[in-house]
Image (cartoon, rainbow, N blue to C red):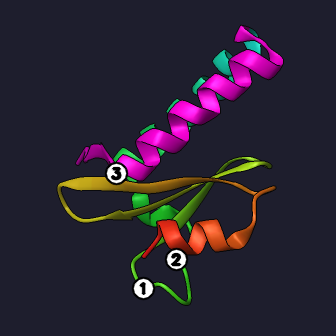
Amino acid sequence: MKRKIILSKIAEKRLENLFDYLEGEWSENIKTTFIKKLDKCLNILKETPEIFPESIKNKGLRKCVITKHNILFYRFNKKQVKIVTIFDTRQDLTKLKKDIK
């Protein structure tokens, strides 16, 4: 069963900032490559969200590595997958803790 993907407001903002960064600091091609990797992850999440590891500290929260610098955190039920945040691994972990509360 395919689930619907829902982005939290935090995830929308993080994704928008990431796209701006990739386009401004790198190139449109890098941004396109990232979008393809993100789409691949989202397609997997729609079908089999339980495939990625669950957090030990935050029950129900799972993570999907998009690239070595970007991790997608999500929760799911029978009907939807909610993207909680997209985290840049080079950032301070306190930002992640605020996003996943």
- Which residue type carries mark 3? Ser
User: In the current view of this chain or complex, which residue is farthest to the left?
Assistant: 79
Highlighted magenta segment, given as a residue range = 1-28
- Which residue type carries mark 2? Glu
- Which label number is shown at residue 59? 1
Q: Where on the picture, by quarter, is residue 56? A: bottom right
Which quadrant: the C terminus? bottom left
Query: Which residue appears at 39% of the width and 78% of the height?
Result: 60
Query: Which residue appears at 25% of the width and 47% of the height?
Result: 3
For residue 60, side relative to residue 31 (left or right): left
- Which label number is shown at residue 8? 3
Query: Do we see residue 37 in this rendering?
Result: no
Mark 2 vs 1: CB contact within 8 A: yes
Where disc 3 sits, the SS reads loop
* Residue 65 on image: x %, y %: 66, 53
* Residue 97 on image: x %, y %: 57, 75
Q: CA distance from mark 2 to mark 1?
A: 7 Å
Q: Which residue is mark 2?
A: 54
Q: Main secondary structure of the magenta part?
A: helix
- Which residue type carries mark 1? Lys
Where disc 2 sits, the SS reads loop
Front label number (3 vs 2): 3
> Is 18 located above or below residue 52 in the figure?
above
For residue 46, side relative to residue 35 (left or right): left
- Which label number is shown at residue 36? none
User: In the current view of this chain or complex, which residue is farthest to the top?
Assistant: 28
Query: Do we see residue 42 in this rendering?
Result: yes
> Is 53 located above or below residue 58 in the figure?
above
Query: Which residue appears at 49% of the width and 65% of the height?
Result: 99
